[in-house]
Amino acid sequence: MNSTDPRLQAECLRHVSRRGFLQAAATVTAEIAFQTSRAPGAEASAGAIIDTNVFLGQWPFRHEVLNSTAALVARLRANGVAEAWAGSFDALLHKDISSVNARLAQECQRNGDGLLVPVGAINPMLPGWEEDLRRCVENHRMPAIRLHPNYHGYRLDAPVFERVLALADERNLLVQISVIMEDERTIHPLVNVPPTDTAPLSAALEKFPKMRLQLLNSFRTLRGLPVLSLAARGVRFEIATLEQVAGIATLLEKFPPQNLCFGSYAPFFYLESAKLKLQESALNPAQMQALCFDNARRLSGR
Amino acid sequence: MKIWDLHCHLTGVTGTTPEERMAQLIAIADRMGIERLCVYMGIPWSLDPSPETFRKENDQVLRAIGKFPLRTFGFVYLNPKHVEASLAELERCVANGPMVGVKLWVAEHCNAPELDPIIRRAAELNAVIFQHTWFNITGGKPGESTPNEFAELAARHPSVPLICGHTGGDWELGIRAIRHLKNVYADLAGSDPVAGYTEMAVRELGAERVLYGSDAGGRSFASQLAKVYGADISDDARRLIFSENLKRLLLPILNAKGIPV
């Protein structure tokens, strides 16, 4: 892909992803058998999956078990994931975000085995962040950006956030916002980062009615009416931090099914958590297909 | 692979009666291949229950497990601030009733001496003893115990098996706090499925001292099962964690009560 037109890139990615989808089919068949033998009871099994929430790089406070891209990709593939949207842990604390994003793009290309889609980070509190966004699009051909407002120190009613949305809208980028990275009760005391406050988000989105925006790791702190309100605005969510028994099925009793995507938050979380949630809820094949693949594909703009 | 869940509640599911809630929980557990569920505390939860309140909650659990005697085990919920009433409740529900364990939550810090007579009597009955713990940098609940406080309790009762609930939540600290205490077991339940948790527990404690639990229905069975299915450990370790360790702990009281395994 040499084009700098994000819409053309998205189209190319669609074909790449479709190929990955077909290649994954055999793996998925094997996975269904594997899953059945380990944890019986599923009524509807997942087909190929788009994982909208994975990370590369180094988590600052722990040596990850899946500590290489190859190991992560192998685990994703073994669980039927055909495509994964990858941000970088390094983006949380590094000031040289340009370098973080360049390494992320290179790592996805070199070791992603056709499965990883790099999602660059933007820190609008850094001088010259607009250039980072330009590079994400034009140099690295990234279809999305990932924001960490709590780690980077701004609110969603700040003018700079509106500026990020405006540029993302102009570039037709998907915007992912991370609400938390870990349980606030167990966070390292020197990095006492509160969850991102999503209360101002609805108002912020009024100016960008066509914005594609997804919240990551949101369900620990965001529940009930605020979730439904944001979903009504078109905000998408993913399941990594969704708890409660049969949590997906319970959520879908009120929540628009097209707004929920698969997300594992691997390698920080055991990937099997999100995968087993598909089994814990009695989902029909249409719900399963939407959750695992179709919703993310639509969200990606393809 | 058999799965026994150490840590379940009647919350997170709907139903107008404890029996209905238990039925729902079991139906979902069936989807995940979970054979037995330990259940404690009623609805609504009480942080610091009066004797009347914990008796009421225990009655709800008795109803729930009474309906599903081959799938569930009940633990009696006690409050060490009311020692005599707690001991009487222990007699009612465990010595003279079908329950097989004790649940202690956040009413009182667990290093308090008031726990000692409860621990001693529970040990005489071979009841499995579960104490909630958390290292919470945001402050936590009044009376909430840390694994450090739990370690003090465990050191006072070295011959009594004790379960460190949630392994302190901040498990990298919790595992360190209990690793020198051979009578202490780590409960994996009720925290995010952070990779590395089970690997560290097995490395530092040995698989024989690690127990699977979910904290369902507020927590997902899936997220908690993933801590064991997804961990880089041997299948032998997985078997121990999923059921064999808990079975070993429960066997004396199950045998004494004639409860089939």
Image (cartoon, coloured by chain):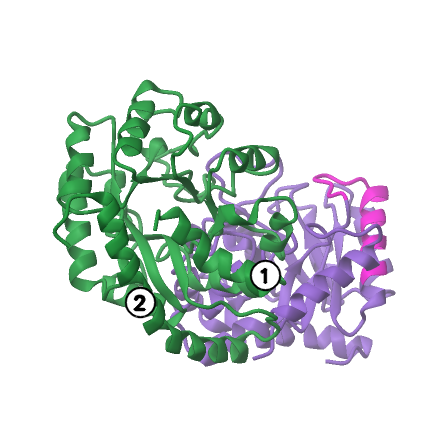
Query: Residue flagged by tag 1: what amino acid is it?
Result: Phe
Outermost residue, top side: A159
Question: Callout 2: residue from which chain?
Answer: A
Residue nearer the viewer, A84 or A233: A233
Residue A227 at x, y percent in the picture: 55, 37
Residue named by callout 2: A20
Task: Work out whether disc 2 and disc 1 sit on a shared chain.
Answer: no
Q: Colour of chain A?
A: green
Q: Characterize the magenta stretch by its predominant secondary structure.
A: helix
Residue named by callout 1: B221
Region rendered in magenta: B44-64
Residue B180 at x, y percent in the picture: 45, 61
Q: Colour of chain B?
A: purple
Residue drawn at 16 percent across, 47 percent down: A140
Query: Residue flagged by tag 2: what amino acid is it?
Result: Gly
Whether residue B185 appears in this view of the structure is no
Residue nearer the viewer, A58 or B61: A58
